[in-house]
Image: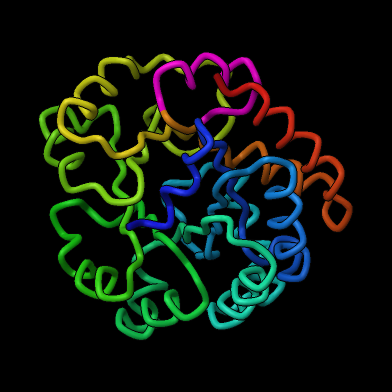
Amino acid sequence: MSKINNAFKNGKAFIAFLTAGDPSLEKTEQYILTMEKSGADLIEIGIPFSDPIAEGKVIERANIRALNAGTPTDKIFDMVQRVRQKTDVPLVFLTYLNPVFSYGYEKFFQKCRAVGIDGIIIPDLPFEEKIEILPYANENEVDLISLIAPTSEDRISMIAQQGKGFIYVVSSMGVTGVRKEITTDLQMMMQTIKAASNIPICVGFGISTPEQVKEISNFCDGVIVGSAIVKIIEEYGQNAEAPLANYVAKMKRSLN
């Protein structure tokens, strides 16, 4: 059984994202543990990449800061291994195909298993081409998490049927980033997904306020917040622990 299920065992999940190595890997480790203690049910760890096409300016800047600080993939694995000795919270990598390809598919997923990574999200991997890495992910018990966007339309059922871990529903068109309002007809998308699969459905892209969490969590199993968290880390750098703890606790309390 997927370890990601543990994120939903006590009800709706709050999923927090941060970029590994921003402002340092030591702080990333600390902030993961802080967010977990403050109520995050699952944590997505971004592997920094020079061309993160799905990301807005906030996460793009975090990628640049992390790369400039020197954040090789091996050091990220070492950091995850240290985190795993202190918590069982589900951990998921968010990365692009190039870093995984460059590392070597087999080696990458074996390492994921060794350090305790439960899933992976690869925004630039088309659903139809996932067979390229799926055998390595399956063999090492790493859930390849599928994204469903507002443009998926007639492909929604097919993607949902083959989903693992959870379905990542992209709330808005475009790149990640804080949005004042989410205008996509999410409820219609949820109905289509639920008709095809009983896998948990989580919504991300643009969610930043307790009000948005409260509204969106009415019709999904979890809410994903990235840019707003990365913005706090950008603002406070080495001293982001208290602001992060307050923000995550507030967002978690807002889940319906």
Q: Which residues are magenta?
A: 206-220
Magenta segment main secondary structure: helix
Residue at x 55%, y 35% (from the top left corner)? 177
- Whether residue 27 sits left or right of residue 132 in the image: it is right
Left or right: residue 237 compared with residue 29: right
Q: Quadrant of residue 187?
A: top left
Q: Is residue 140 above or below residue 220?
A: below
Q: Is residue 231 above or below residue 213?
A: below
Q: Position of residue 49 (x, y in %)?
A: 50, 65
What is the x, y in percent for residue 39? 68, 40
The x and y percentages for residue 132 are: 18, 69
Quadrant of residue 103 in the image? bottom left
Classify 70 as above or below 220.
below
Q: Nearer the viewer, residue 219 or 147?
A: 219
Estimate the x, y position of residue 161 in percent, counting from the top left.
15, 42
Left or right, 73 with respect to 150, comes to: right
Is residue 208 a member of the stretch shown in magenta? yes
Nearest the eye: 45 or 196: 196
Note whether 83 is above or below 175 in the view shown. below
Q: Is residue 88 left or right of residue 234?
A: left
The image shows a total of numbered marks equal to: 0
The picture quadrant where one finds residue 85 is bottom right
